[in-house]
Amino acid sequence: MIVAIDGPAGAGKSSVARGVAAALGFTYLDTGALYRTIALAALQQGIAPSDGPALGALAGATAIELDGVRVLMDGRDVSERIRDADVTELVSVISAHPAVRSALLLHQQHAASSGDIVIEGRDIGTAVAPDAAVKVFLTASPEERARRRAAQLGLPMDADTLKELAEDLAARDRADETRASSPLTRAADAIEMDTTDMTQEEVIAAIVELTRRAAPRG
Ligand code: DC
């Protein structure tokens, strides 16, 4: 059974998806980590962000292992490195190339075929797992998303920091929403959840409940 969780940057998808997977005993796949790993590989190998064919080949040739917590790129632990600002800045451009998306789609579909899984990203309900049993589109107000991102990065909650984070998130959302190849968008049959005034535990409980209701009985 597949639970697809999509939504804009900073809506709390990762923490929620991890919590849902833990509560249900499902595996967890963070697809953003795949795109981040290719962005890091491109940085390290000096491949131009505009070179779609080279980036597609890179995505096909890079071994990425995810175990729910750690991310290994060709055997090296890059779990923390892929969260750095230079990777975050580059990742939307890298992930817009169709050749990159199709190489990583294979990786994601392989993972999705292996049983009960919570998959988190931007195009899971629309492109990666359109038949997912549960599809949720998580949102939150821009102000709340900036606060959550500051907390995640351990940054102060002052007005300047929050403003800068909100601008970064908005720029990344614009890039993710307007790309031609499987853009960030809510699947027609996804349930939209505005989590602005919800705690993480409430969001997790709501998705766990949706999943239990969707599960075949017997
Ligand atoms: O979830 P995240 O912030 O780690 O994702 C990083 C970027 O990867 C995001 O800005 C767009 C891209 N991405 C994507 O295009 N499709 C996905 N399924 C997941 C992430």
Image (cartoon, rainbow, N blue to C red):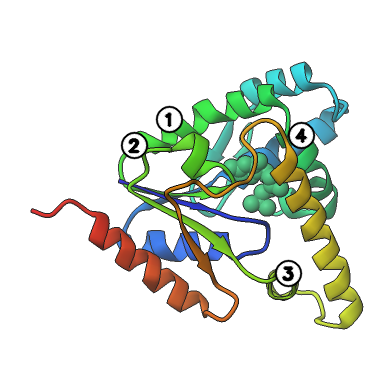
The amino acid beneath tag 3 is: Pro
Q: What is the CA distance from the residue labelled 3 to the residue labelled 2?
A: 35 Å
Count neighbours of disc 3 (C-alpha within 10 A) and say few if under 14, some if 14 to 19, many if 20 or more.
many
Number of the label disc, if any, that sits on residue 110 = 1
Inspect the image, locate mark 1, and give the three-letter code of the amino acid beneath it.
His
> Which one is earlier in the sequence, the residue at label 3 or at label 1?
1
Mark 2 = which residue? 114
Please tell me which residue is depicted at 83% across the width and 48% down the height of the picture. Answer: 89
**136 or 18: nearer the viewer:** 136
Q: Quadrant of residue 47?
A: top right
Q: Position of residue 99 (x, y in %)?
A: 67, 21
Pair 3/1: label in front: 3
- Which residue matches tag 3? 142
Residue 11 visible somewhere in the drawing: yes
Q: Is residue 23 visible?
A: no
Answer with mark 4 or mark 2, whichever residue precedes in sequence: 4
Q: Where does residue 56 sit, x and y in percent of width and height?
A: 70, 21
3D distance between C-alphas at marks 4 and 2: 27 Å
Q: Earlier in the sequence, mark 3 or mark 4?
A: 4
